[in-house]
Image (cartoon, rainbow, N blue to C red):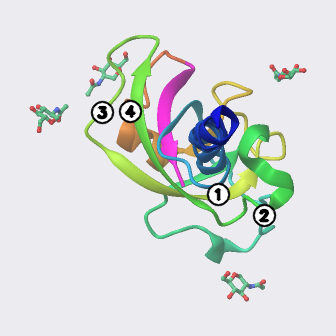
Amino acid sequence: MYGSQSQPCLQGLSLIFLIPLFFNFHISYGDVGTAALYSPPYLPTACYGSNTSQFPSSKFFAAAGHGIWDEGAACGRQYFVRCISDLTLDACNQNHSIQITIVDHMGQEASVPSAYNTTMFLSATAFGTIANSSTTSPHINIEFRQ
Ligand SMILES: *[C@@H]1O[C@H](CO)[C@@H](O)[C@H](O)[C@H]1NC(C)=O
Ligand SMILES: *[C@@H]1O[C@H](CO)[C@@H](O)[C@H](O)[C@H]1NC(C)=O
Ligand SMILES: *[C@@H]1O[C@H](CO)[C@@H](O)[C@H](O)[C@H]1NC(C)=O
Ligand SMILES: *[C@@H]1O[C@H](CO)[C@@H](O)[C@H](O)[C@H]1NC(C)=O
């Protein structure tokens, strides 16, 4: 009697814990990370070499950090990115959310970024749209989702 009542309860509990895990791995609803600025030259990229047609017309693109590179599967993935805070406290333009495309891999990019080991490196246009590019903050804190 007692056993048959506690069993469904346990199954319900494990479902509650498994569902967020599943969604975290497959669909991200606003993960928090960091982004640095990287400036030209952008070619060649780890994803598409020297092909100049790879960049979106918006010029919103990025190099993936090791955490999201996914052994190259990140190439072409799109993320919504928003600046949430920075070290100087006034560089973020929090009202702007932009959609970026991954074209490169951190460490293989052709230019020197403003900081290393961030979630992603944003192109100058992308970075300058969500934050003040002249900031002395080497990286910004971002919210991002695929
Ligand atoms: C460059 O990229 C475009 C779009 O992805 C593709 O259609 C084209 O074939 C590529 N060109 C070369 C030379 O690979
Ligand atoms: C951001 O949006 C809010 C609400 O729409 C507005 O009050 C604020 O002035 C905006 N800030 C900037 C920096 O545009
Ligand atoms: C990036 O992080 C890795 C591991 O945490 C570390 O070994 C490496 O030195 C870091 N690179 C830079 C340039 O800070
Ligand atoms: C951007 O940052 C620089 C350096 O901190 C500052 O001088 C400039 O006024 C800022 N621009 C805007 C639009 O906030």
Mark 3 vs mark 2: give the one in front. Answer: 3
What residue is shown at x 75% (from left), y 39% (from top)?
A: 67
> Which residues fall within the magenta stretch?
138-146
Residue 78, picture quadrant: bottom right
Foreground pick, 76 / 125: 76
The disc labelled 1 sits on which kind of residue? Ile
The disc labelled 4 sits on which kind of residue? Ala
Q: Earlier in the sequence, mark 4 or mark 1?
A: 1
Foreground pick, 23 / 116: 23
Residue 43, picture quadrant: bottom right
Kindly identify which residue carries mark 4. 131
The disc labelled 2 sits on which kind of residue? Cys
Kindly identify which residue carries mark 1. 102
Q: Is mark 4 within 8 Å of ligand 4?
A: no
Q: Main secondary structure of the magenta part?
A: strand
User: Label 3's element?
Assistant: loop
